Image: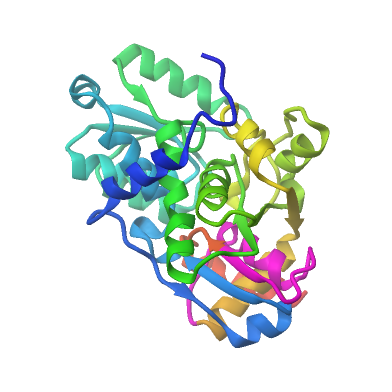
Amino acid sequence: MTVTSHSITAADIAKAAEILQNHAIRTPVMTSRQADEIAGAQLFFKCENFQRIGAFKFRGAYNAISQLTPAQRQAGVIAFSSGNHAQAMALAARELGVKVTIVMPHDAPAAKLAATRGYGANVVIYQRQTEDREAITQRLAAEHGLTMIPPYDYPQVIAGQGTAAKELIEEVGPLDILLVCTGGGGLLSGCAIAAHHWSPGCRVFGVEPEAGNDVQQAFRSGEKVWIPVPKTIADGAQTQQVGNLTFPIIQHYVEDILTVTDQQLCQQMRFFMERMKMVVEPTGCLAAAAAMNQVIDLRGKKVGVIVSGGNVDVDKIGQYLAMAQD
């Protein structure tokens, strides 16, 4: 089947929202007068760092596993992830009584590795710099008859992630602009579809780390671009290329892809901790950092900001806060 920009619809997101009721947390929307003054706009932070497993990924994982056939559930599922999708798949599979295997890089944050194993997943470790995680996952799926649910390139995952923007718009009303953290594009794709449907006229921007701007390059050139594993503290955005399914959706619904530096991410982490009393991981700071560093003109606008997660190794927080002052 040829993938089109309309492969996932608002109806799919609405269905996901129904499935997630009583399972996913309807995360809070927070505001900050100081953030508004810095950005020159009215910012609404959708705080997915308070979601189950500490990130938006639970939405897509639970939605995807819940829609498998009985035979697929019986056989089990497999996924690859640097951390948040891993934890989300592990917890969702446990709740739905499905066996799960997760392929994770050797340098994944220790807290994410421990949590994934703690939820009962079978973890297979690979070397990020020398091995192909998708190839490993596909081989294991074929050998054991497992259903592969990738972190972003999967219709039910994208639909599940889109419920974050749906909830945000339901709570605060139509938006002028929506800023979304971007790795492989699953969250951005789902949220862009949701914004297009529930807030017509809303301009949607994805935000990547400057060192890993594969989606920006692809978006601006019109062709998928592959990059080496980017050196960035935003581990959730260390993807090497945009997804086959997410790319046409992004091309259709998104206005542009923006970037911020690692130092700006550290400064944003510090702001969240000092001013808003919450812990946000570097990847989760991407959209907010773009807003508060005025990467685009937001003056006078009503802006939604997706804060994607809060899973940061505690022993690295001091290092990140120091980087904020360099």
Residue 128 against residue 13 in the figure, above or below: above
The number of discs equals 0
**In this view of the protein, can residue 21 be seen by the observer?**
yes
**In this view of the protein, can residue 129 be seen by the observer?**
no
Please state the horizontal and vertical placement of residue 32, each as a whole percent of the image.
Answer: 57, 83
Q: Which sits in the foreground, 324 or 178?
A: 178
Left or right of 269 on screen, residue 277: left
Q: Which sits in the foreground, 216 or 89?
A: 216
Answer whether residue 163 is magenta in the image: no
Which of the 4 image quadrants contains residue 297? bottom right
Left or right of 99 on screen, residue 169: right
**Residue lying at 31% horizontally and 21% vertically, measured from the top left:** 146
Left or right of 22 on screen, residue 116: right
Residue 244 against residue 193 in the figure, above or below: above
**Residue lying at 45% horizontally and 32% vertically, measured from the top left:** 155
Answer whether residue 282 is magenta in the image: yes
Please state the horizontal and vertical placement of residue 108, each as a whole percent of the image.
Answer: 50, 46
Which of the 4 image quadrants contains residue 262? bottom right
Left or right of 263 on screen, residue 60: left
**Residue lying at 72% horizontally and 30% vertically, measured from the top left:** 226
Give the residue at the far right of this rendering.
221
Which image quarter holds the C terminus?
bottom right
**Residue lying at 52% horizontally and 25% vertically, measured from the top left:** 134
Q: What segment carries the magenta color?
A: 277-305
Please state the horizontal and vertical placement of residue 257, each as a whole percent of the image.
Answer: 73, 49
Please state the horizontal and vertical placement of residue 313, each as a whole percent of the image.
Answer: 48, 62
